[in-house]
Image (tube, grey):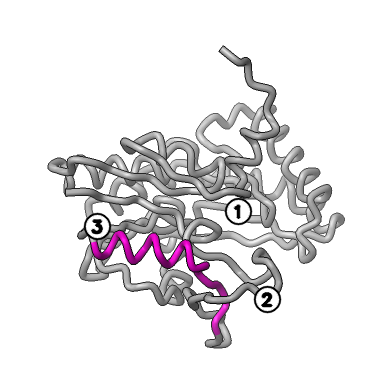
Amino acid sequence: MIVAFTDLDDTLFQTLRKLPPGMQGLTPATLGRNGQPHSFCTPAQAALLAHFEASGITVIPVTGRDPAAMARVTLPFTSWRVLDHGLTILRPDGQVDAEWRVRVLETIHALQDALEECTAAVSERAAALGCRLSRHTAHDTPFMTVLKHPDADAGRLEQVQLVLEAHLATRGYADLHVIANANNVSVLPRHLGKAEAVRHLREQHFPQAALTLALGDSLSDLAFMNACDLALTPPGGQLLRTVTAAKLPQR
């Protein structure tokens, strides 16, 4: 048995804004809140998914999307699904994995005060920079604060990131960490996320897998990618951009 654990946005599909103008052969992959196609698979991404299906490979999404956003993905995922940055696991029948839910709630209940304080610490600066702040929940409990800029202004997002990182360091909140990409900056639990969810599924439900693949584009995907046997990443993603920019020793 082969299992592929895969990030979704910017790995298996992306919005038109991130594609070459006029690119042909696109396959709709998600719907927007208005019900219209929003993200698309390129021919290469569609070919990869078709190969997985033809080969009998079990494909498990590992995504930051919440259940509502996952419901707008139109690709036919039929196995387990990892949502909310790892804090929600859905069974193949679509029900929440109760065992994982108990573990998650124990963790995030203990982080509520720290998360609330971090949110308060960045709110004023974020507003001054024109960033929108939202709080995300899993199992009806806050677990993440997300800041976005309407124009994805990298400089302003970086300023917000620095404020959050400085606050975590000053307060010694080692159980929270900051992740960032071109679209947003988030603070969320450090020790419970995508990687732990993938390990849970491997140990509890796929111990017989001969090979596990990981697909991801972001630095925040690295931990769960390291929990698998082999990893794939798309060109132009945050991971490859970071590696390309690094001055690595040639030895």
Q: Are marks 3 and 2 in contact (CB under 8 Å)?
A: no
Q: Which residue is mark 1?
A: 145
In terms of secondary structure, where does tag 2 sit?
Answer: loop
In percent of width and height, residue 92 lies at: 22, 65
Q: Which mark is residue 115?
A: none
Q: Which residue is mark 3?
A: 58
Task: Identify which residue is drawn at 47% across, 74% down.
Answer: 29
- Which of disc 2 and disc 1 is earlier in sequence? 2
In terms of secondary structure, where does tag 1 sit?
Answer: strand
Task: Identify which residue is drawn at 41% across, 40% down.
Answer: 231
Which amino acid, mark 1? Thr
Residue 162: image quadrant is top right
The residue range painted magenta reads 37-54
Which amino acid, mark 3? Thr
In percent of width and height, residue 193 lies at: 42, 44
Q: CA distance from mark 3 to mark 2?
A: 32 Å
- Which of disc 2 and disc 3 is earlier in sequence? 2
Q: Which residue is mark 2?
A: 22
Residue 49: in magenta span: yes
10 Å crowding of disc 1: few (<14), some (14-19), many (20+) = many
10 Å crowding of disc 3: few (<14), some (14-19), many (20+) = some
